[in-house]
Image: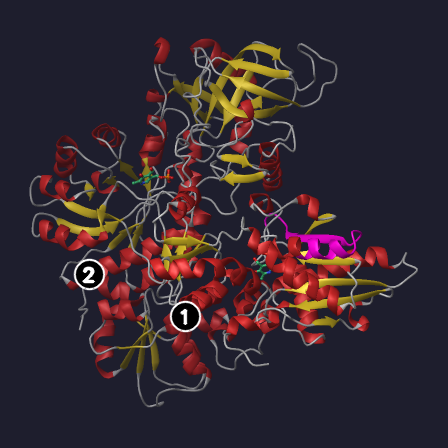
């Protein structure tokens, strides 16, 4: 059984050490419980700020709210230098009520009239997503950015996935004609859903060219917003990741026993002894993630001008805005679940927890990592001899064959017992509520904030958390 | 040798002995199969010609584009052959990591499509990965493409079964070597040669070399990726071993500096992997044995790859006039002009804007000239590019680079050079005029 040990930062470790407190939370609220660690977010913002400082960059780090609905996280982030990127009317209202002043809020994504109205009324900058949105902006004083997509590369053709968002670069002139006097253009934006730096470099340089076009028309946008997508490194050990992915390929080829439920290949399949398809999982171990990834991107030479993108940005005097979601929530939360059944079936160890794949949506997002089993590590429990590590399949609580917390056989330090707590760490970014469901009349998962005050851990309901001290 | 067509020059490459003083093996004669001497420069000339030849007539009739998934030598050979027959060529790749090769392919008239990376917000319902989609498009009939499909095409293997392999046997006076060592990309060359050699001597040992998982040697696959290769059959190899980029470069240096062979990284990897493997058997041998490895292509396309990994190989003595030679104290003491005084100072000075040309053209201080920092650095290496009596104001984005150059110019004896404090950004923030011509 090959392990994928999660990266556990000291703050997460110290929460896991509070077994009794976590036990009380699950006892009180029922399984599962979402735990957020608001005090962890500031350090992630600081890492991004550090890149800005070292490179003499100016601009705003907007937290992409969509990654987690938590109030505690948002209120805590409002006490840092970060702004917030909101993508719905409700997120905008939430940001305003969590302490963000309008000049630190950016409205993104497709918008309806109510969303546009409140943004314009409060003076929030709007990144317009379509030509129609430009006409829908009320008044004449709104500050806007244009989100562009469909950048074209020269020489080597970069085949990017088609995006349903944004205004095509070819339509920039039309957009500028539409804006004419109706709003103030403060910048251009893009967001690319890819981990590939080379693709982003094409967009970055394309956006610089588009900004130049705006200048040529006498406009003075000073900001380039390059969206989110800086990633998180989920695993402690790159070698484990390499061993696991190699072995998975061998399992798909039939050269070793299956490592997944029903031999699921995560995008790989065997055809005549040859591996086809491609591994569609998140690159859970990453060389550069978060602020380091941004740094790497800025060091990348522009494909056309062959000068580092960060240098070009400074040359042009632009501010850089970013919208990291996942990366700012690294080590900011965990999901607590209760083991409700442990059994053997056809030689496999099956562990059912009182939560479903929507509550802990790592699988939905393709992130593979082992959970943490709380309690003693000795092989007590329903002992089958050796007290060694073992593989288990994690079943969810829905009446669906497909409701496995993960189709990957996970590695546990011992056989769990009914009643044990199984904890999924580093789940604050997208894995808590993004796809959660109330199917089979399951209640919405309660969310609590854990925080340290006066030298010990305390907790409260997420909506009751207010950061300490004066701003 | 007189040919009507350059493709006739493909194959019949020499087999050259490596001086035992270089490899140090006592009981083994080691030979290099000089595939780098093929007319388009690599072992892939044979495979490319073998695969595309039967398609040419039909493709020319329909005006099809020749397509291959290749990031290097196969693309190069196909681009040249397609060009000879008036056909367009397109290379599809996600592994084009060596800039010289990119540029060369563009020069040869190839189109290059680079596949996208994984999505950051993964959608697992999208099982339709770009590579699969690409395959589907290529195989649609009437789609305007002929796909040589080097990872699955048996003609790739046959080129070596009928060419490379028998040539080696002929040059060894009708004998197969005891050991054959090759790097594995599509597995075409190693599989074809192995089959030919074993037809002569079933006991020939075949060693396949791949790169380690997180390593990169242009032209060959990692230990995982070989399983995605249709032609790869583990049964062909007695062992498949990883070879590191570091070893490949060591081997390359030995071949280049001591053997007069302009080998690229995979040739170097094959040499180093061969010697590493053969050393383990050499000591226990009682009779003479022979071994052959392949030098696939030439070193010239990999200069940036080598520079990135072994900068010391290109080490030049420190330049006399370079910003790198300045101490932090010297930079800190650079003469600067504050923004408030800058407009007046600029009126009588030569204002040099060190930013990129596009940024300069978009907006700059009126009357300034643009010399991008890198070019300016080159000029200073050769001495002062303006008179000492000429006051100079250097401008960059935030006043850092300009401070370094001002310090350097001062050190070179220029009495009236200044850096704009805070750079052009501070100038803009002070609402001073910027123009666009
Ligand atoms: C416009 C926009 N900005 C930012 C983000 C945040 O991306 P990430 O969480 O990967 O940083 C997203 C994610 O979907 C997005 O659509
Ligand atoms: C430089 C280089 N070396 C080695 C190889 C491996 O040859 P083959 O594809 O026949 O395995 C290739 C081909 O891809 C190559 O380009």
Q: Position of residue B327 (x, y in %)?
A: 51, 72
Note whether A199 is above or below A327 in the view shown: below
Q: Position of residue A219 (x, y in %)?
A: 15, 58
Tell me the residue at 32%/49% (across/down).
A226
B156 vs B375, left or right, is right
Is residue B375 highlighted in magenta? no
Residue A469 visible in rendering: no
| Residue stretch in magenta | B193-214
Tell me the residue at 52%/70% (across/down).
B7
B392 vs A427, left or right, is left
Residue A193: quarter of image = top left
Assign the C terminus of chain A to one quadrant of the image.
top left
Label 2 belongs to which residue? A213
Residue A324 visible in rendering: yes
Nearest the eye: A280 or A376: A280
Assign the N terminus of chain A to one quadrant of the image.
top right
- Residue B107 is labelled as 1
Q: Position of residue B371 (x, y in %)?
A: 33, 77
């Amino acid at each position: 059984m090959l392990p994928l040990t999660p990266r556990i930062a000291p703050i997460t470790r110290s929460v896991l050490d509070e077994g009794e407190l976590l036990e009380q939370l699950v006892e009180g609220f029922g399984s599962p419980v979402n735990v957020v660690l608001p005090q962890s977010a500031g350090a992630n913002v600081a890492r991004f700020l550090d890149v800005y400082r070292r490179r003499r960059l100016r601009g705003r780090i907007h937290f992409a709210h969509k990654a987690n609905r938590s109030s505690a996280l948002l209120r805590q982030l409002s006490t840092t230098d970060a702004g917030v990127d909101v993508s719905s009317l409700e997120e905008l209202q939430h940001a305003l009520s969590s302490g963000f002043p309008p000049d630190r809020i950016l409205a993104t994504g497709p918008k309806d009239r109510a969303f546009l109205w409140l943004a314009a009324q409060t003076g929030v900058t709007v990144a317009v997503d379509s030509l129609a949105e430009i006409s829908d902006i009320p008044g004449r004083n709104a500050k806007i950015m244009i989100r562009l997509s469909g950048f074209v590369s020269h020489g080597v053709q970069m085949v990017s996935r088609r995006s349903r968002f944004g205004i095509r670069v070819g339509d920039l002139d039309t957009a500028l004609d539409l804006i004419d006097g109706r709003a103030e253009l403060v910048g251009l934006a893009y967001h690319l859903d890819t981990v590939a730096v080379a693709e982003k470099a094409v967009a970055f340089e394309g956006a610089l060219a588009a900004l130049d076009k705006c200048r040529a028309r006498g406009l003075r946008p000073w900001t380039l917003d390059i969206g989110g997508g800086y990633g998180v490194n989920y695993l402690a050990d790159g070698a484990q990741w390499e061993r696991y992915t190699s072995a998975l390929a061998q399992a798909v080829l039939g050269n070793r026993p299956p490592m997944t439920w029903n031999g699921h290949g995560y995008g790989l399949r065997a055809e005549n002894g040859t591996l086809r398809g491609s591994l569609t999982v998140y690159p859970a171990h990453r060389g550069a993630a978060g602020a380091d990834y941004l740094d790497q991107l800025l060091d990348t030479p522009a494909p056309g001008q062959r000068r580092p993108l960060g240098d070009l940005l400074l040359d042009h005097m632009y501010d850089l805005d970013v919208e990291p979601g996942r990366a700012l929530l690294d080590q900011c939360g965990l999901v607590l679940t209760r083991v409700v059944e442990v059994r053997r079936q056809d030689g496999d160890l099956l562990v059912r927890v009182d939560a479903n794949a929507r509550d802990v949506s790592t699988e939905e997002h393709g992130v593979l990592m082992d959970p943490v089993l709380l309690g003693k590590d000795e092989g007590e429990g329903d002992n089958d001899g050796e007290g060694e590590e073992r593989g288990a399949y994690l079943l969810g609580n829905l009446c669906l064959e497909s409701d496995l917390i993960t189709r990957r056989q996970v590695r546990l330090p011992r056989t769990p017992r009914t009643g044990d707590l199984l904890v999924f760490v580093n789940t604050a970014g997208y894995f808590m509520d993004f796809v959660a469901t109330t199917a089979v009349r399951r209640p919405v998962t309660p969310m609590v904030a854990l925080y340290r005050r006066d030298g010990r851990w305390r907790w409260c309901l997420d909506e009751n958390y207010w950061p300490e001290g004066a701003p | 040798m007189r040919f009507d067509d350059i493709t006739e020059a493909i194959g019949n490459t020499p087999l050259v002995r490596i001086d035992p003083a270089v490899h140090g093996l006592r009981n083994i004669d080691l030979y290099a199969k000089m595939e780098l001497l093929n007319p388009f420069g690599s072992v892939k000339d044979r495979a490319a010609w073998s695969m595309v030849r039967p398609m040419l007539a039909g493709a020319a009739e329909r005006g099809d584009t020749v397509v291959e998934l290749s990031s290097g030598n196969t693309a190069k050979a196909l681009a040249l052959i397609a060009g000879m027959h008036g056909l367009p060529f397109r290379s599809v790749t996600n592994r084009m990591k060596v800039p010289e090769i990119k540029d060369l392919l563009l020069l040869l008239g190839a189109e290059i499509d680079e596949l996208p990376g994984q999505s950051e917000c993964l959608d697992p319902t999208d099982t339709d990965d770009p590579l699969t989609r690409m395959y589907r498009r290529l195989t649609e009939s009437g789609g305007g493409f002929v796909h040589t499909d080097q990872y699955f095409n048996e003609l790739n293997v046959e080129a070596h079964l009928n060419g490379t392999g028998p040539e080696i046997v002929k040059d060894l006076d009708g004998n197969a070597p005891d050991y054959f060592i090759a790097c594995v990309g599509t597995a075409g060359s190693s599989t074809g040669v192995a089959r030919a050699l074993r037809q002569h001597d079933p006991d020939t040992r075949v060693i396949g070399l791949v790169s380690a998982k997180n390593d990169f040697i242009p032209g060959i696959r990692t230990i995982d990726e070989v399983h995605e290769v249709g032609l790869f059959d583990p049964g062909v190899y007695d062992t498949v071993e990883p070879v590191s980029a570091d070893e490949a470069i060591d081997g390359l240096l030995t071949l280049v500096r001591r053997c007069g062979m302009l080998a690229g990284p995979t040739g170097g990897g094959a040499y180093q992997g061969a010697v590493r493997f053969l050393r383990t058997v050499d000591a226990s041998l009682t009779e003479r044995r022979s071994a052959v490895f392949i030098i696939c292509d030439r070193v010239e396309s990999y200069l940036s790859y080598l520079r990135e990994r072994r900068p010391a190989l290109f080490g030049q003595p420190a330049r006399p006039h370079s910003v790198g030679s300045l101490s932090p104290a010297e930079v800190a003491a650079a003469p600067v002009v504050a923004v408030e005084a800058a407009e007046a100072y600029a009126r009588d000075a030569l204002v040099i804007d060190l930013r990129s040309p596009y940024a300069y053209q978009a907006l700059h201080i009126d009357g300034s000239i643009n010399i991008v920092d890198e070019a300016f650095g080159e000029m200073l290496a050769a001495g002062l590019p303006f008179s000492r009596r000429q006051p100079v104001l250097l401008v960059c984005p935030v006043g850092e680079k300009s401070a370094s150059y001002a310090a350097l110019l001062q050190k070179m004896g220029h009495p009236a050079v200044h850096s704009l404090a805070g750079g052009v950004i501070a100038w803009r923030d002070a609402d001073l005029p910027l123009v666009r011509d």
